[in-house]
Amino acid sequence: MIDEKKLENMVREVLANMGKNESTEGAIKECSETEQCNLDVEDYPLATQRPDLVKTARGQSLDDITLDEVMKGNIKPEDLRITDKTLLMQAEIAEKVGRRQLAQNFRRAAELTKVPDDRILEIYTALRPYRSSKEELLSIAEELEKTYNAPLCANHVEEAAEVYERRRLLKGME
């Protein structure tokens, strides 16, 4: 049985934190699914500055996520996950303010939204020192690129395989 009072308090707390530093000033910028949104630092954080751009995987807006909708069962777990588009918008903002590494991390995270959680955990484990051979890591990289269309992540795993080989961190090199 769900403790409705605790759930309501938790949702209120989350919504209150999302609303901090809220501002609606500035021009509304439009963007499509396939192009950059011309976002800049004033658009950060998106949830408060540009909630019109933030959508769930099922296309709902942040305003659609209410306690009433949760209680009715209309909000699914996937509605609370960040989407690849939102992560790419965050990357765009990070790039504009000179945070290139952070932007690259957001882009890799966007690619990983297509990979099942259990597979991500398996890959994470495989990337730990001495857990995988070079061939196993290269196989993971190929899977990321071909199965999930995640070339940035694939490149990251390929680079790890090369570094692990140089540093003797591959399975069997202990």
Image (tube, helix red, strand yellow):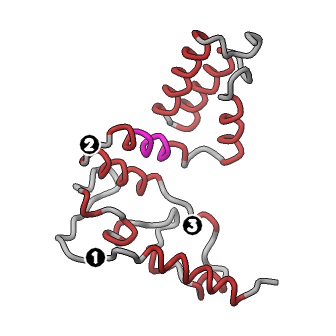
Alpha carbons under labels 3 and 2: distance apart:
29 Å
Position of 51 relative to 120 (above/below): below
Above or below, comparing residue 150 to residue 20 in the picture: above
Residue 48 location, x and y as percent?
Answer: 36, 72
At mark 3, the secondary structure is helix
| Amino acid on which the number 3 mark rests in the picture | Leu
Q: Which residue is mark 2?
A: 98
| Camera-side residue of 173 and 61 | 173
The numbered dot on residue 23 is 1
19 magenta-colored = no
Q: Residue at x 61, y 16 (%)?
A: 164
Q: Residue at x 64, y 22 (%)?
A: 137
Q: Main secondary structure of the magenta part?
A: helix
Q: What number of labels is visible?
A: 3
Where is residue 34 shown, x and y percent of the image? 32, 50
What residue span does the magenta drawing correspond to?
104-110
Q: Measuring 47% from the left and 40% from the top, which residue is drawn there? A: 108
Q: Position of residue 54 (x, y in %)?
A: 40, 66
Report crowding for label 1: few under 14, some 14 to 19, many 20 or more residues within 10 A (C-alpha): few
For the C terminus, the quadrant is top right
Residue 42 placement: quadrant: bottom left
Nearer-N-terminus badge (2/1): 1
**What crowding class fits label 3: few (fewer than 14 Cα within 10 Å), some (14-19), or many (20 or more)?**
few
Q: Amino acid at mark 2?
A: Gly
Under tag 1, what secondary structure? loop
Whether residue 105 appears in magenta in the rendering, the answer is yes
> Mark 1 or mark 3, which has the lower sequence index?
1
What's the mark number on residue 80? Answer: 3
Lower position in the chain sequence, tag 3 or tag 2: 3
